[in-house]
Image (cartoon, rainbow, N blue to C red):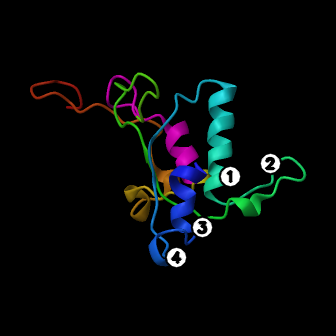
Amino acid sequence: MQNSFGWATAGHGYKNKTFPAAVGETGSYMSSAADVAMLTDMARYLHNDYSSLPPGFDYQKFPHKTLPNLAWWAWNANSGDTGGIVESDWITVLWKKVNWMVGAIHLTPWYMAYVSPQALPPTAKPPVEVGSQAGR
């Protein structure tokens, strides 16, 4: 990650300038210990938390500013290697993924500016079909 993102925030650019950087198109099924370990390590790297590095590792060789931006791939469940933020019904939100982004990466989804996270339902409900007797 340092070769892809970190150098851009550390003043190694043209005329020692720094640049905004964001990790793009990352994601995970979050279904195995290896997935969770990778996401944990990535969150630590993004926030300059070197607490999990082995003793004697010189983290100063890899300077960068905090990287607070990330794009999860994808919204829909069609991504074969990461799944999506919603299940294959395109309605049910996989809150463990959203909660990881909010908790570990400290991202603020657009809805959090308007709604308390405790007020959100655990899953979205499908809309009532036109002509349906449900909900009457």
Residue occupying the point 63% across, 50% down:
43
For discs 3 and 1, the disc positioned in front in the rendered view: 3
Disc 2 is placed on an element classified as loop
Was residue 30 drawn as part of the magenta stretch in this picture? Answer: no
Instruction: Tell me which numbered mark, 2 or 1, is placed earlier along the sequence.
Output: 1
Pointer 4 or 3: first along the chain: 4
Confirm or deny contact between disc 2 and disc 4 (CB under 8 A): no
**In screen coordinates, is 127 left or right of 79?**
left
Please tell me the numbered disc located at residue 16: 4
Indicate the amino acid at tag 2: Ser
Which residue in the protein does label 2 denote?
52
| Residue 100 x/y as whole percent | 57, 45
Q: Secondary structure at mark 4?
A: helix
Q: Amino acid at mark 4?
A: Asn
Q: From the image, which quarter does the C terminus lie in?
A: top left
Task: Confirm or deny contact between disc 2 and disc 1 (CB under 8 A).
Answer: yes
Magenta residues (range): 86-102
Q: Residue at x 75, y 64 (%)?
A: 60
User: Percent from the top left, x then y, of residue 19?
Assistant: 45, 69
Please name the residue that numbered disc 1 is placed on. 44
- The residue labelled by disc 3 is 65
CA–CA distance in space, label 3 to label 1: 12 Å
Decide if residue 131 is on the left or right side of residue 82.
left
